Image: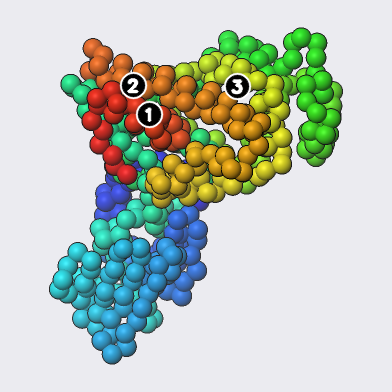
Amino acid sequence: MKKRLSFFIALVLSITLLTTPIVSGSELGEISLLVNHIEVDFDQSPVWVEDTLYIPFRALFDALGGEVLWDEESRIATGIYNDYTINVQIDDSLVKTYLSEDFFYEETLVLNGRLLLSVQFITELLPVYAYWYDEFNAVHIAAPSQGFFWEINNDGVLVYLLGSIHVGKEDLYPIRSAIEYAFLSSDYLVLEADILNVDEAIIPYLNNLQMYTDGSTLEDNISEDLFNEVLEFYAQFGIGADIINLFKPWALTLEINSVNLAMQGFSGEYGIESYFLNYKPESMEIIELEGLIYQMELLNSYSPELQEYLLADVLRNSSDEFILMNMWKDGDLELLESIYVLDENEMTSEEKALSNEYLDALMIKRNYEMTDAIEALLIGETKGTYFVIIGAGHFVGEEGIIDLLINKGFDIVSHN
C-alpha cells in the first residue's frame, strides 16, 4: 500500500470514485478493504456495480471500532460509530440516520447474507474519507485526524494556526479537510524552522555546537553512573566511548530520543511539518519564525545540570508517543493542556528548579517571541493568508500563544 496519502486526494475524492471505469467483478478480482490503514478480513468483498462501489456494512463498523446491532423481527441493521447511527431496513432498502427522523429509500445490496452500502453514502454520513487505489484494487476508508486549529482575521490578513506534533506514523493521516482547504488557500507557510531545506553552509556550525571544543569530554561533565548508562545504550549499536565522549548531553538526548521513537515506529517523515512541506504548492513562500540555528543554540544554552537531567530522563523513562499521536488524531485539547501542568508534589526542589528552567527556555520564552511574530503578520503591510504551524504545546496555557494573542486584542476563532 502507498506509504503516504497526498492531501489533495481528499479534495478530488468524489471525482476519483465516480469516474472509475465500469467493470465487472470478475475483471477486477476481489477488492481489498482497508480501514484506518489496516486491511480488514471479511466474508463478503466490496463490489462495483456499474460506477458505484459498495462496501460491507458490518466489516466497516467493526473495523472503525463501532458496533452493529441486528433486530430479526424488524429486519433492521443498526451501525453505531461514536455519535453517528445508521439504521437499514434491508428488505426494502430503507434507511434512517442521525440526520433524519423518518426512513427514506437508499440503494443497498445484500450479497451472501451481508449488507453493503455505497462508499459515497458512507462518506456523506460518517466522518471518514475514502480512497480508491487502482494499482492495488483496494478501497481505503479512514477517519481523518482532527488536530488543533484556530484562525484570526485582522484587517485583510488571515492567519491560520495549526498545533503540530513533530513525528508521527502513516495512520496519522488523512487530516480533516477544513485544515487542508485552509492550507491550499494560503499564500505563506509559516514554520518554527524549515526542516527539509537546510542551508548546507550552516551544517558545520550546527555540528560544532553539539560537540565539546574546550578539551573536556562527556565523561567529565556527567556522573559516572549516567555515563555508564550512555555507554550501555550505544553498545547495542557498536558505538564506543571514543565517539560518545565528543558530544554534549543535550545532543545525545536528542539522538537517543530519536532512536527510541524510531523503535516505536515513529518518524519525522510523518510529522505535521514534513507533511505540509512535502505537498505545498511551489508558489507558496516559506517563512521561518526561528530557524534551526536559533533552536540549536537554545538547546546548547541549557545549564549543565539541566542537560544531565534530561539525558538521564530519556534513558530511564520511556516516552509513549502513541498517547501524543492519538491526542492529535482526536483533537483532545483537554489532554494537551494537562500535559504541560507540572505535578510539583511529586518533585524534589532540584527537579522543580530544573523543570522550570526547561519550560521557561523551551516553551514560555519562545511563546512570547512567536506571539510577537504572529502579531507582526497580522498588523503588517503585506496582506494575505498565512498558514502557521507550531508545536501544539505552544498554544495552550495562560502563557500559551492563544491566550497571549487574545490579551493583545485579537479575536480568535477556534475550530477545535
Specify the quadrant of the image occupied by residue 27. bottom left
Q: Which residue is labeled 2 in the image? A: 374
Position of 231 relative to 75 (above/below): above
Label placed on residue 401? 1
398 or 85, which is in the foreground? 398
Q: Are marks 1 and 2 in contact (CB under 8 Å)?
A: yes
Specify the quadrant of the image occupied by residue 388. top left
Task: Name the spot of residue 65 as percent of width and height, x first.
Answer: 44, 65
Name the amino acid type tagged 3. Answer: Leu
Q: Are marks 3 and 2 in contact (CB under 8 Å)?
A: no
Q: How is the image coloured?
A: rainbow
Name the amino acid type tagged 2. Answer: Ile
Name the amino acid type tagged 1. Answer: Ile
Label placed on residue 136? none
State left or right for residue 183 relative to residue 173.
Answer: left
Q: Earlier in the sequence, mark 1 or mark 3?
A: 3
Q: Residue at the spot x=48%, y=54% of the render? A: 37
Q: CA distance from mark 1 to mark 3?
A: 21 Å
State left or right for residue 157 relative to residue 350.
Answer: left
Task: Point out the frontmost of discs 1 and 2.
Answer: 1
Say few, some or many: other residues with alpha carbon within 10 Å of mark 1 (under 14 / 14 to 19 / 20 or more).
many
Q: Which residue is labeled 3 in the image? A: 299
Q: Residue at the spot x=43%, y=25% of the render? A: 367
Position of 325 relative to 401 (above/below): below
Q: Residue at the spot x=25%, y=36% of the render? A: 413
Say few, some or many: other residues with alpha carbon within 10 Å of mark 3 (under 14 / 14 to 19 / 20 or more).
some
Residue 29 can be seen, yes or no: no
Residue 324 can be seen, yes or no: yes
Q: Earlier in the sequence, mark 3 or mark 2?
A: 3
